Structure formats: C-alpha cells, structure tokens
Image: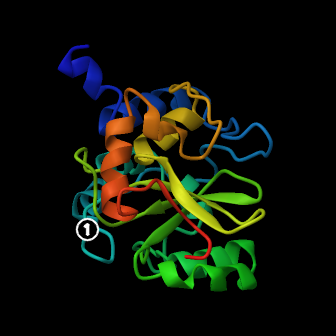
Amino acid sequence: MTEEAGSAEHGAALAERVVETVRREPGRSMLSYQHVPWVAGTSGPMPADALAEAVFPSGRPLPPSLRAWLGFDTSLLERFGWFAPGGGFSPRPLDRLVGEEMGGHWGEFFAPLADRFAECFLLPGGSDSRRVLAVGEPDSRGEYPVLAVDVDDLPFVGLMYPGFDVYLAHTAGLVHRDFPSYTALAGDAVYGPRMREHCAHWFAGDVCAEFPF
C-alpha cells in the first residue's frame, strides 16, 4: 500500500470520504435500528474563521477528522449536545455524561474515571451502551479515541475506534469491520497500531477498564 493510499484510511482524508457519501443523501439514517439522520435542520458548516480558531476548552486542538466534518456540518453534533448555548464546545466528564445519558446511579460507578476522562462528547450509537469521544492524549494521526461505554451486566469502558475518523467511516459503511467485541479493532491490521497507541495512553496498555474501576 502506498503512503497516499494509506492516508486515505485515516484522519481528514477518511472523514472527507464520508462527507462525499453523506452529501449525496444527507437525510438518511446513520443507524439501522434508530432514525438518526446524518444532517438535520439548518445549522450547516461551522464558519471558516471560527473553525480555524476552534480548540477544545482544555486547549487541545480538534482532531483533523473533526475539522473536516465541521467544515461540512454542525447539526449532527449539535443534536448530541456538543455545543454550549452561547457557542463553543460543551464537554462533560465521563461520570456526568454516563449519569445524564444512562441514569444517575450509573454515573456514580464511573466517578473514579472522571479525572482521566474529563473532556468527553456523546456520539450516536448503542442501545444499552454509548459511543463517546474522549479528548486527551492523541494518537500519531492527531485523533482522539472513541470509547464504548456499557452498563449491561457490569460497568465497562473500552476503546472501540481509534478516532472520530474511523467511527464516521464505519458508521457510513466505508470501513467494513466486524465487532465480535467492542475492542476488536485492537487486532486490526490497519487500525490496530493506532488502537494500541491509545491503549498505552489511556489504559496503561490494556484495551479497557472494567468494574470495579
């Protein structure tokens, strides 16, 4: 595989491929089991000057894939609570996000992880689980991991995607992977190396954290 071809499977280039497919049918659902249109309302793209200056509240930069997506649409992430009423990003620590989205008593179980996962954003996907972008140490592509958070049986949080780029592309059907477990991409030939970077940064070399945290 050439370097150019490899780059098309990561970061902004991969997100731009998703944009091309969504642009053709923006109202179609992201999910097969629930109607969540890719684009809804009239929000449109983030203005170019605002996007050029945008950073997360922590000061960390936006990942390349997110910049590419926001240059196309803000409505999807707006619907999932990414933005404060006055503008700007509105992250939540993991325990508060879980409590507000899955029930307050569940959030209490995730309190020991709140400092590690202090800047989180909800993404579409999951039923008794959720998909969460966690901002912190990026991988070598400048991307932050997307976590699976589950409270069925025992509380669980683990690496599901190495970045917003792969999350988008898999959801859009451009990246075809089976998920026998949430963390299956850790063994993937293309995305495994990035997953393992996140393992080292976020989970002390493991792919997940299981209860009791």
Q: Is residue 68 in view from this perspective?
A: no
Q: Quarter of the image holding residue 22?
A: top right
Residue at position x 66%, y 50% in the image:
125
Closest to the observer, 207 or 108: 207
Q: Amino acid at mark 1?
A: Arg
Eyeballing the image, is 198 above or below 119?
A: above
Residue 78 quadrant = bottom right
To which quarter of the image does residue 213 belong?
bottom right
Please indicate whether residue 14 sits to the left or right of residue 108 in the image. left
Q: Position of residue 1 (x, y in %)?
A: 26, 13
Query: Foreground residue, 159 or 25?
Result: 159
User: Depth check: 200 or 134 in front?
Assistant: 200
Q: Residue at label 1?
A: 60
Residue at 22% of width from left, 64% of height from top? 53
Q: Is residue 112 left or right of residue 40?
A: left
Residue 4 position within the rendered picture, expressed as x and y whole percent measured from the top left: 21, 20
Residue ranking furthest to the left: 3
State the SS at label 1. Answer: loop
Q: Position of residue 66 (x, y in %)?
A: 38, 50
**What residue is at 28 percent from the left and 56 percent from the top?**
138
